[in-house]
Amino acid sequence: MIVTNLETIPGKTIVRHFGLVQGNTIRAKHIGRDIMAGLKNIFGGELAGYTELLSESRQEATDRMIAQAESIGANAVLNVRYSTSSVAQGAAELYAYGTAVVVE
Amino acid sequence: MNIDLIVFIALMALGYGFGQFAERRHYRSILQREADTLKVPAMTLKTLPPQLHGCSVALVSGNVVISVDFFKRFLSSLRNLVGGRVKSYESLLDRARREAVLRMKEAAIAQGAKVIANVRIETASISKYSRGKESVGSIEVLAYGTAIMPGRPQV
């Protein structure tokens, strides 16, 4: 599975087009991390717990998108975009979407 | 009342001391790593030069969540009264974006990339409710792009 945010894969041609595939996940942060974050809000600096949480969640959203692409028989996902939105206090939605295609 | 004032001054002092120290250290590390990763350009172009056609590609990303310190948050709330440039947040966002791009570049270098194409940078604020009103607690920056790896056939 080729995953890229280019619109074409250089040197390959798209032979079939499946349309949009997407994956999302909504995560809430847990209280321990929240306490650490409260401290960091005084001292400033990186919130390593949140960074890790968000990158794990984004990976999960990407994996779901890839699973969907595989299930419809694509071998590549092009023009992948990420978006983040906060749905409730303390929870964030991570969303990944792209176009599933067959390339040769 | 007096206790509140003492706590407030202590938080300001802690925020100023640790915040300035952390920021200076972070900028040093950013400058060093930017110099180290200069050989892998991150471009926002979508089309590649023909000599890079047929290379293997992969999505790479880097993210960072970073928070402003108490002192700077107070300064920015003062700035809200008169308007104008909020320098304390400018440096926060600058650091976060450069850090995210650097992490993306380091992930790409680890995979043997020579170029990163179509880089996109996205910012989300992780807001925090304090005393009933919303205030920016910290921001997340995500940088992602396509790593181009020559000399390796695509699987």
Image (tube, rainbow, N blue to C red):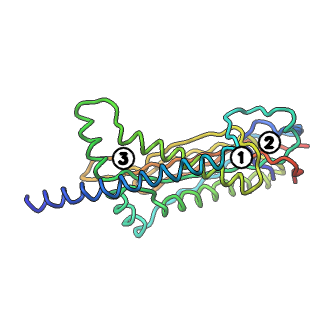
Q: 10 Å neighbourhood of mark 2: few (<14), some, or many (≥20)?
A: some
Which residue carries the number 2 mark?
A: A18
Q: Alpha-carbon distance for marks 2 and 1?
A: 8 Å
Q: Position of residue B49 (x, y in %)?
A: 82, 32
Q: Position of residue B105 (x, y in %)?
A: 66, 49
Tell me, yes or no, whether the two marked residues, 2 and 1, touch with CB atoms within 8 Å: yes
Q: 10 Å neighbourhood of mark 3: few (<14), some, or many (≥20)?
A: some
Disc number for residue A10: none
B145 vs A89, nearest the viewer: B145
Q: Are marks 2 and 1 on the same chain?
A: yes
**Residue at 72 percent of width and 44 percent of height:** B146
Q: Alpha-carbon distance for marks 3 and 1?
A: 33 Å
**B74 lies left or right of B22:** left
Give the mark toward the camera: 3 or 2: 3
Q: Three-letter amino acid code at disc 2?
A: Phe
Disc number for residue B136: 3
Q: Three-letter amino acid code at disc 3?
A: Val
Q: Chain of mark 3?
A: B
Q: Three-letter amino acid code at disc 1?
A: Val
B13 vs B101, nearest the viewer: B13
Q: Secondary structure at mark 2?
A: strand
Q: Chain of mark 2?
A: A
A94 vs B8, nearest the viewer: B8
Which residue carries the number 1 mark?
A: A21
Q: Secondary structure at mark 1?
A: strand
Q: Position of residue B55 (x, y in %)?
A: 85, 45
Q: Within the image, what quadrant is residue B78 found in?
A: top left
**Residue at 30 percent of width and 47 percent of height:** B73
Q: Position of residue B59 (x, y in %)?
A: 72, 49
B144 vs A89, nearest the viewer: B144
**Residue at 44 percent of width and 66 percent of height:** A30
Q: Within the image, what quadrant is residue B155 found in?
A: bottom right
